[in-house]
Image: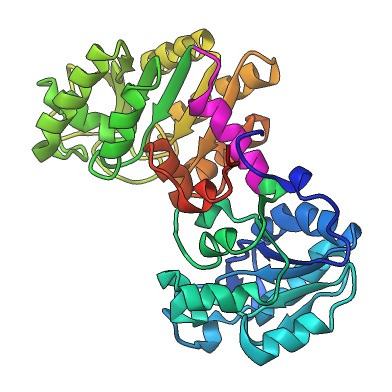
């Protein structure tokens, strides 16, 4: 990655106080971490800095305390999980600025790791207040951002610090930026995007950006029903935003003007009830009964999607193709995900996916590990797909 400053550009960090912004906003139950995935993903960067003699000072948020000290949002219960993942002790300070933080930082030796208390306990964090940025910066010599998931926020610890101290992307951030560049900014063509999910309304910006950037666009999930309705097809009792028919028509027009082929379902799996293993049948999208709802794309649609994936060199995926949480309405998502995974494993496809439902859907299909990159960043990944600048990323861009 030449466009962004990374740890490769930082030189020796021995003896330096490194403020490392991480995302350890992990699920907790009864004071214990129930899923340490986010912690495990930042371990390599923590280890690299510590093993090089840097003094690692972890900055993180937890929950939404909105500038107030809420005990339920303390980061202290996360310390044992970080220590376990690292295989070394982790100290804790009960504030991220002021005397408590300064004393804990002063006690560090080369290679030590310290977690500071929730940055969002201070209102200055979300306001990106210069005085708060300065107070954070007092405890560091270098700033490293490893929290792509928070990079769409211009907060003190995600953006402000990058202008106050020498700033670099951590290894996880670097991998994310590398994957995103390969996905849309400088992709190998042809590029196919698969966009699913329930509603068009939440993905208008995304669809408008993608039709101008990709060669093929697959629209699935509940949002496909709105496009089918806009084309004059009956969708029965399916989830459908009928008031967005004009928006859907406009997006299809923009796609045609940009020479982007839109792939919509040609057949559908329908049912009368929204529940697992409901009685279902497959029909043409021209023959959906009035009392039935579309819950998945049918096999003919999947064959068309698979054929399009075969044409593509790059795939960007956001959102499932049907109600994948309910069998048998997971079939289209599972089949297409596995096909993309096989193409990736064969070295014929660069596949980048992201967004909460997407991660769950790919894991459900047993396909996630075979994708080139699966982002857990949620909102940041979606805003990047929408073509928006991410403040935390832009602050790390190499000058000149």
Looking at the image, which is closer to me, 199 or 188? 188
Q: Residue at x 82, y 50 (%)?
A: 11
- Which x, y percent locates residue 310? 53, 10
Q: Is residue 297 above or below residue 8?
A: above
Looking at the image, which is closer to me, 26 or 221? 26
The picture quadrant where one finds residue 374 is: top right
The residues colored magenta run 173-189
Q: Say how the picture is coloured.
A: rainbow
Query: Seen in the image, is 205 located left or right of residue 394?
Result: left
Query: Seen in the image, is 194 located left or right of residue 42?
Result: left
Query: Seen in the image, is 380 located left or right of residue 233?
Result: right
Q: Residue at x 84, y 54 (%)?
A: 48
Magenta span includes 180: yes
From where the camera sits, is residue 298 visible?
no
Q: Is residue 1 above or below residue 37?
A: above
- Which x, y percent locates residue 308? 45, 11
Magenta span includes 177: yes
Q: Residue at x 80, y 62 (%)?
A: 85
The picture quadrant where one finds residue 34 is: bottom right
Q: Residue at x 69, y 84 (%)?
A: 101
Image quadrant holding the N terminus, namely top right
Image quadrant holding the C terminus, namely top right
Q: How many marks?
A: 0
Q: Residue furthest bottom?
A: 99
- Which x, y percent locates residue 132? 52, 77
- Which x, y percent locates residue 129? 44, 73
Q: Residue furthest front?
A: 400
Q: Main secondary structure of the magenta part?
A: helix
From where the camera sits, is residue 218 visible?
yes
The picture quadrant where one finds residue 329 is: top left
């Amino acid at each position: 990655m030449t466009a962004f400053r990374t740890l490769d550009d930082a030189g020796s960090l021995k003896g330096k106080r490194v403020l490392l912004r991480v995302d350890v906003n992990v699920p907790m139950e009864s004071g214990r971490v129930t899923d340490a995935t986010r912690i495990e993903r930042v371990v390599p960067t923590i280890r690299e800095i510590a093993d090089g003699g840097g003094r690692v000072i972890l900055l993180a948020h937890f929950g939404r305390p909105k500038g107030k000290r809420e005990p339920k949002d303390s980061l202290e219960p996360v310390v044992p999980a970080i220590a376990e993942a690292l295989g070394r002790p982790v100290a804790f300070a009960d504030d991220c600025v002021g005397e408590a933080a300064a004393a804990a930082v002063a006690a560090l030796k080369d290679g030590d790791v310290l977690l500071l208390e929730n940055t969002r306990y201070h209102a200055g964090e979300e306001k990106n207040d210069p005085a708060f940025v300065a107070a954070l910066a007092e405890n560091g010599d270098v700033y490293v951002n490893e929290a792509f998931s928070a990079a769409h926020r211009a907060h003190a610890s995600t953006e402000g610090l990058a202008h106050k101290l020498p700033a670099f992307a951590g290894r996880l951030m670097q991998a994310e930026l590398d994957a995103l560049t390969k996905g849309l900014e400088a992709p190998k063509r042809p590029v196919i995007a698969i966009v699913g999910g329930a509603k068009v309304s939440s993905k208008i910006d995304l669809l408008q950006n993608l039709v101008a950037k990709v060669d093929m666009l697959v629209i699935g999930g509940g949002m496909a029903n709105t496009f089918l309705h806009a084309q004059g097809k009956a969708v029965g009792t399916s989830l459908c935003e009928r008031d967005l028919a004009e928006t859907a028509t406009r997006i299809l027009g923009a796609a045609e003007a940009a020479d982007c082929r839109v792939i919509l379902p040609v057949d559908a799996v329908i049912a009368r009830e929204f529940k697992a293993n409901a009685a279902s049948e497959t029909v043409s999208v021209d023959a959906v009964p009035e009392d039935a709802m579309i819950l998945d794309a049918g096999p003919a649609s999947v064959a068309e999607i698979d054929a399009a994936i075969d044409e593509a060199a790059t795939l960007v995926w956001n959102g499932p193709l049907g109600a994948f949480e309910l069998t048998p309405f997971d079939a289209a998502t599972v089949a297409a995900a596995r096909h993309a995974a096989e193409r990736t494993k064969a070295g014929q496809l660069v596949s980048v996916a992201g967004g909460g439902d997407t991660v769950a859907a790919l894991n459900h299909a047993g396909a996630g590990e075979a994708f080139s990159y699966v982002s857990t960043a949620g909102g940041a990944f979606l805003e990047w797909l929408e073509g928006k600048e991410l403040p935390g990323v832009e602050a790390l861009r190499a000058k000149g």
